[in-house]
Amino acid sequence: MARLQTFGYLAVCVLGIYASYLTQGVVQERLSTTKYGLIGARFAQMKSLNGIQSLTCFLWAALLVLPFKARRAGAQTAPWTAYWRAAVTNSVGPACGYEALKNISYPAQVLAKSCKMVPVMVLGTIIGGKRYSVLEYICSGLIGGGISLFAAQSMSGASKKLSNPNAPLGYALCAVNLILDGYTNAAQDKIHAQYKGTSSLVTMCWMNFWCSIYNAAFLFIFSSSGYQALFIFETIREFGSLTNTMITTTRKFFNILLSVLWNGNALAPQQWAAVFMVFSGLLTSSYLKGRRHSARPDKVKTKG
């Protein structure tokens, strides 16, 4: 029963992340490739989207957290100052991802970022002292390889819609994004391990508080130019950053799959092989995570 509840809770988090990111992916790709107005102008405020999202998520979380100051009984909640380092990389990383879309196509960006679980696992080991099994590395390889194979088959003609194609710069920005995201996830894992009473809303609140400050400074000083975060922070708190990364990485696969099916394009044999690889790694990894999570001491109820 406990394992069933665990899988059900994870399913809610997965659905929340997929619904948010699939919507964001469609809007983000359209904004970066569509020409607007009579003169065919491009949307020039991609960087500001991070700031708007951070501010919205902070205000929403603060509205729920600050009046009640909810805590887990007998556990300490992380202070607001604990998040400033992770928020730096959480601000810069996505900004690099937005900027990359000006230089490479969306499928190409998915292809480059499909190995995101690797830096998350490496930095999680270095920063948080986490250990992963050989099977988890194999699952990550299957998922990343499957997404790469699928995305490679979906890139034809997509670069023609770009405003300023520059593959080396685009892939370099994706690499920076991957490294910074890896640090962000590892840092959040470490915070939750140190302050076990920290809820997902607290993390959402203070991460976005610092991100709002950094983005505001960038937008108004150094430049002229949410709801999904709740599911992400809850997934990190309950299931760890690797599970969250697996979900957010595979949703990129579903973004491309949705785009292909929506436009009535048939899948090539290589893409069906990619589908098999992704789901094999995803289902195996989900099983391992569910079994480990249900065995955690804090999830076992004592009789009384």
Image (tube, helix red, strand yellow):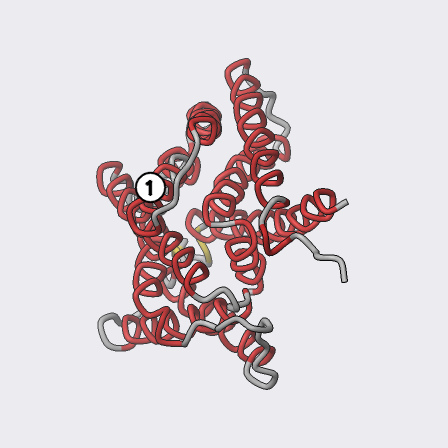
Q: Is residue 114 above or below residue 219?
A: above
Compared to 221, does 279 lie above or below?
Answer: above
Q: Which amino acid lies under the numbered mark 1 shown in the image of this protein?
A: Pro
Residue at x 61%, y 38% (from the top left corner): 291
Number of labels in the image equals: 1
Q: Residue at x 36, y 37 (%)?
A: 118
Question: Which residue is drawn at the image coordinates 38% and 66% (left, top)?
Answer: 48
Q: Nearer the viewer, residue 49 or 199?
A: 199
Q: Is residue 17 above or below residue 108?
A: below
272 vs 127, nearest the viewer:
127
Report the residue that reaches farthest toward the top.
269
**Quadrant of image for the N terminus:** top right
Give the left or right position of residue 192, taking residue 282 as reference. left
- Quadrant in the picture for the C terminus: bottom right
**Residue sitting at the far front:** 304
Q: Position of residue 73 (x, y in %)?
A: 60, 73
Camera-side residue of 189 and 144: 189
Q: Secondary structure at mark 1?
A: helix
How crowded is the residue under tag 1: few (<14 C-alpha within 10 Å), some, or many (20+)?
some
Image coordinates of residue 262 in percent, x first then y, are: 64, 35
Report which quarter residue 211 is drawn in: bottom left
Q: Position of residue 177 (x, y in %)?
A: 32, 49
Identify which residue, 240 or 183, lies in the foreground: 240
As drawn, the residue found furthest toward the bottom would be 67
- Whether residue 86 sits left or right of residue 20 in the image: it is left
> Is 241 positioned to the left or the right of 267 in the image?
left
Q: Position of residue 190 (x, y in %)?
A: 39, 57
Judging by the rendered image, the residue that carries numbered circle 1 is: 119
Residue at left 58%, top 71%? 72
